[in-house]
Image (cartoon, grey):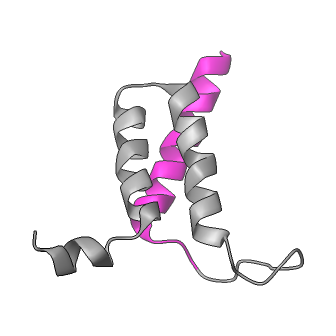
Amino acid sequence: MDQYEKDKIRLSDRILSALQLALEQDDLKIAELLTSAMEQSMTRNTGGGEFIERRDYPPEIEDAMDKLYDMRKNHKS
């Protein structure tokens, strides 16, 4: 990967990679922290307190959120 490609990667992309790893390792605490960090990185500077996210999330994020939801259910049982 050259410097141009590295510059195009967003912080949320890096956090998503770490989140996916935490989910694979069944680490709920870290997955929760990374989810919060990812949400913050995706929504900062986006229109103030009344801002409502209207775009769809990429399939990778939807998949990670589904896995996190399942993990939460499994850890509660």
Q: Position of residue 51 (x, y in %)?
A: 81, 80
Magenta region: 56-77
Quadrant housing residue 8: bottom left
Left or right relative to 6: residue 43: right
Identify which residue is drawn at 43% across, 44% down. 19
Judged by its main secondary structure, the magenta piece is helix
Farthest residue, direction left: 1
Q: Quick one: 15 or 24, which is closer to the camera?
A: 15
Q: Which corner quadrant holds the C terminus? A: top right
> Quarter-wise, where is residue 60 in the image?
bottom left
Q: Is residue 45 left or right of residue 35?
A: right
Q: Is residue 76 magenta?
A: yes
Residue 23 position in % (x across, y down): 42, 35
Which residue occupies 34% across, 33% down? Answer: 24
Number of numbered discs visible in the structure rendering: 0
In the image, 5: left or right of 31?
left
Above-or-below relation of 21 to 62: above
Instruction: Give the residue at the far right of this rendering.
Output: 50
> Which image quadrant: the N terminus?
bottom left
Q: Is residue 60 magenta?
A: yes
Q: Position of residue 22 (x, y in %)?
A: 41, 34
Please identify the residue farthest to the top as the structure is shown. 77
- Residue occupying the point 47% across, 60% down: 61
Query: In the picture shown, does residue 64 fall above or below 24?
Result: below
